[in-house]
Image (cartoon, rainbow, N blue to C red):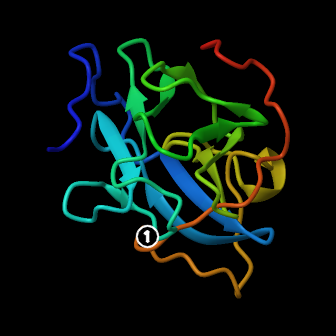
Amino acid sequence: ARWQPPSWVVSPNSPGTLFLDVVKEGQVVESGCVDRQSHYILGRNTAVVDLPTDHPSCSRQHSAIIHRTDGCILLLDLDSAHGTFFGDTQLKPNIPVAIKPGEPFRIGQSTRTYVLRREAGKDDDTNTESSGQQKRSRSPETKVTGFGKSVIEPALGAAEGFGKCV
């Protein structure tokens, strides 16, 4: 059965600006929008997950990215066998943790890292050169395919603001 989110989970107000990048060996290998619905499930069971992973240590329904009414983005381990890691900390099953764009996480024993990225909105006149983190260009060798098969690399250390939604 597909995991069902809590009743307080909502679809975001500004869809099309939040992306999840999958990073392997320092390169973005996949990227997909994660703000067009209230939640996204990551895992191996392609029949029920939104963001498939293809690593043996990933559970069928491993973790979820969920959106709260106040705009906060939460990461949730779905009682996976090999854990979801935010920085060096393994998440407790079924306890959501706030995560912000730029803060990496990983799932299971995979060598890929997942990082949320927010792009500037249509009315924002910033560009790649001036905004740096908001918009970034990808090198020609970076493959952006949407989500198909995924794995992860160790996170870059404990993220600032762990568990807080600012």
Is residue 130 or residue 61 the one in the foreground? 61
- Identify the residue at image location x=67%, y=80%: 142
Is residue 162 or residue 63 the one in the foreground? 63
Q: How many marks?
A: 1
Residue 104 position within the rendered picture, expressed as x and y whole percent measured from the top left: 70, 44
Residue 75 position within the rendered picture, expressed as x and y whole percent measured from the top left: 51, 31
Give the residue furthest to the front: 81
Residue 93 position within the rendered picture, expressed as x and y whole percent measured from the top left: 48, 26
Which of the 4 quarters of the picture holds residue 39?
Answer: top left
Question: Which element is circle 1 on?
Answer: loop
Residue type at mark 1: give it.
Answer: Gly
- Identify the residue at image location x=23%, y=37%: 3
Which quarter of the figure is the C terminus placed in? top right
Which of the 4 quarters of the picture holds residue 159?
Answer: top right
Position of 82 with respect to 131 (left or right) is left
Neighbour tally class for label 1: few under 14, some 14-19, many 20 plus, Cα within 10 Å: some
Give the residue furthest to the left: 1
- Identify the residue at image location x=31%, y=44%: 36
The residue that label 1 is drawn on is 146
Which quarter of the figure is the N terminus placed in? top left
Is residue 73 or residue 158 the one in the foreground? 158
Residue 88 position within the rendered picture, expressed as x and y whole percent measured from the top left: 79, 36
Position of 41 with respect to 63 (left or right) is left
Which of the 4 quarters of the picture holds residue 51?
Answer: bottom left
Position of 119 with respect to 158 (left or right) is left
